[in-house]
């Protein structure tokens, strides 16, 4: 009999087609746009050989115990892996596939769009135009900050940080700087970025793009201390994971004018409750985690997730396999995003 696979969400059609046409698995699908309820998930994963998940599913000891020893391969349709208990997966010898690279262009595009939307106050501006605030042309009205001659800082330099910098360069950015646990000369040379300390990154950046993976070490790394060091004209952009930013400290920094603005594609929690204080701030632009949301990229992610799963079940190298390192430190700011 064929290996059994559970797919925790109605993933885009390309991935399902690959699974169906492979003839190598029998899969069951949670055929909905909404997450599978936890209890249902714990039931469905019993004795499966493979699991395809998305980032809303917590893959922890409880879930892996519910699946049992038959589970050999986990394939997540995401580049982020903070929803996976890597230690538990490693302990059980379960191989893990993920979807880097295919989403880099889409995420970089969205990051630039969010940066410009925040720096040039586009949401405020359309609101003013629609609601009667546009009394006349005014010299200093809705002024923002421009990229020309600016310094752009990248927190966690990986493929996505490089792709963002490549797109920002034509806007006449003066200088790219970055920090990470260690210099990454190969990536940095692609964008002529200079390695600096966290403190210098905070002090010098006009735009600070958060591009690191969420790990215990990066959780809350954008906090009061960082905001205090930043320029009061600086703009923070986060397209990585919400918990990298301490939101209470961010609210304080934005409302007191410690920094000029923030554009967030990710929050804590998701969805962010509609009565959250951050929604009351004009200088905070919040998007509902859509950085990779283009038709082509989401299809490519589902195809890669399917191909990772099939290769893993055949015992072959996966197209994109997450290396489960034992050292905690090595997981720090890999710049996966
Ligand atoms: C999206 O946030 C992803 O991790 O792919
Ligand atoms: C702006 O529209 C200008 O003419 O300066």
Image: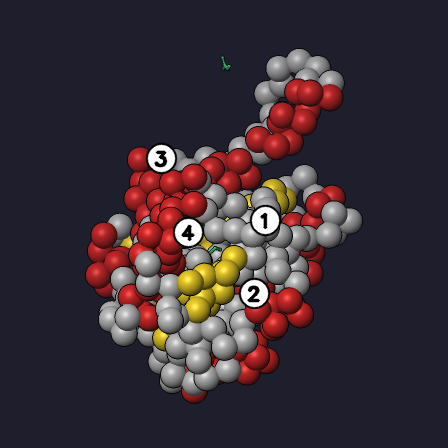
**Could you tell me how far apart the alpha carbons at marks 1 and 3 are, in whole angstroms?**
38 Å
**Could you tell me how far apart the alpha carbons at marks 2 and 3 are, in whole angstroms?**
39 Å
Visible residue check, residue 201 = no
Quadrant housing residue 332 = bottom left
**Could you tell me how far apart the alpha carbons at marks 4 and 2 are, in whole angstroms?**
19 Å
Which residue has dot 3 on it?
171
Which residue has dot 1 on it?
33
Quadrant housing residue 247 = bottom right
Give the mark nearest the N terminus, 3 or 4: 4
**Could you tell me how far apart the alpha carbons at marks 1 and 2 are, in whole angstroms?**
13 Å
* Mark 2–mark 3 CB contact (< 8 Å): no
- Quadrant, the N terminus: bottom left
Horizontal side of 227 relative to 311 (left or right) equals: right
Which residue has dot 2 on it?
57
Horizontal side of 279 relative to 183 (left or right) equals: right
* Residue at x 55%, y 49% (from the top left corner): 289
Which residue has dot 4 on it?
16
Q: Which of the two residues, 300 or 215, is positioned nearer the viewer here?
A: 300
User: Mark 1 near ligand 1 (CB under 8 Å)?
Assistant: no
- Quadrant, the C terminus: bottom left
Give the mark nearest the N terminus, 4 or 2: 4
View extreme (front): residue: 1
Please tell me whether mark 4 sits on a helix, a strand or a loop. helix
* Residue at x 33%, y 63% (from the top left corner): 24
* Residue at x 44%, y 40% (from the top left corner): 294
Give the mark nearest the N terminus, 1 or 4: 4
Q: Nearer the viewer, mark 1 or mark 3?
A: 1
Q: Nearer the viewer, mark 1 or mark 2?
A: 1
In the rendered image, the vertical position of residue 207 relative to residue 245, given as above or below:
above
Visible residue check, residue 282 = yes
Give the mark nearest the N terminus, 1 or 2: 1
């Amino acid at each position: 009999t064929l290996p059994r696979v559970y797919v925790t969400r109605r993933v885009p059609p390309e991935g399902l087609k690959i699974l169906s046409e492979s003839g190598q698995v029998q899969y069951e699908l949670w055929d909905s746009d909404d997450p599978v309820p936890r209890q249902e998930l714990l039931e469905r994963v019993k004795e499966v050989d493979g699991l395809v998940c998305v980032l809303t599913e917590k893959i922890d000891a409880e879930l892996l115990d519910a699946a049992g020893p038959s589970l050999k391969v986990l394939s997540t349709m995401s580049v982020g892996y903070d929803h996976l208990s890597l230690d538990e997966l490693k302990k059980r010898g379960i191989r893990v596939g993920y979807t880097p690279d295919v989403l880099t262009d889409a995420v970089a595009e969205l990051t630039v769009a969010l940066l410009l939307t925040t720096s040039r106050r586009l949401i405020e501006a359309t609101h003013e135009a629609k609601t009667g605030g546009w009394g006349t042309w005014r010299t200093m009205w809705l002024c923002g900050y421009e990229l020309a001659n600016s310094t752009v800082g990248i927190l966690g330099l990986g493929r996505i940080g490089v792709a963002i910098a490549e797109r920002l360069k034509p806007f006449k950015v003066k200088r790219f700087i970055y920090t990470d646990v260690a210099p990454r000369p190969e990536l940095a040379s692609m964008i002529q970025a200079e390695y600096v300390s966290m403190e210098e990154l905070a002090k010098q950046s006009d735009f600070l793009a958060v591009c690191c993976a969420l790990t215990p070490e990066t959780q809350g790394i954008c906090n009061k201390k960082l905001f205090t060091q930043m320029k009061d004209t600086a703009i923070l952009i986060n397209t990585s994971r919400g918990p990298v930013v301490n939101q209470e400290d961010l609210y304080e920094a934005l409302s007191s004018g410690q920094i000029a603005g923030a554009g967030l594609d990710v929050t804590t929690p998701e969805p962010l409750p509609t009565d959250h204080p951050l929604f009351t701030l004009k200088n905070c632009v919040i998007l509902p985690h859509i950085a990779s949301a283009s038709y082509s990229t989401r299809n490519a992610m589902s195809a890669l997730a399917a191909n990772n799963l099939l290769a893993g079940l055949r015992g072959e190298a996966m197209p994109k396999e997450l290396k489960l390192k034992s050292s905690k430190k090595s997981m720090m700011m890999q710049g996966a995003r």
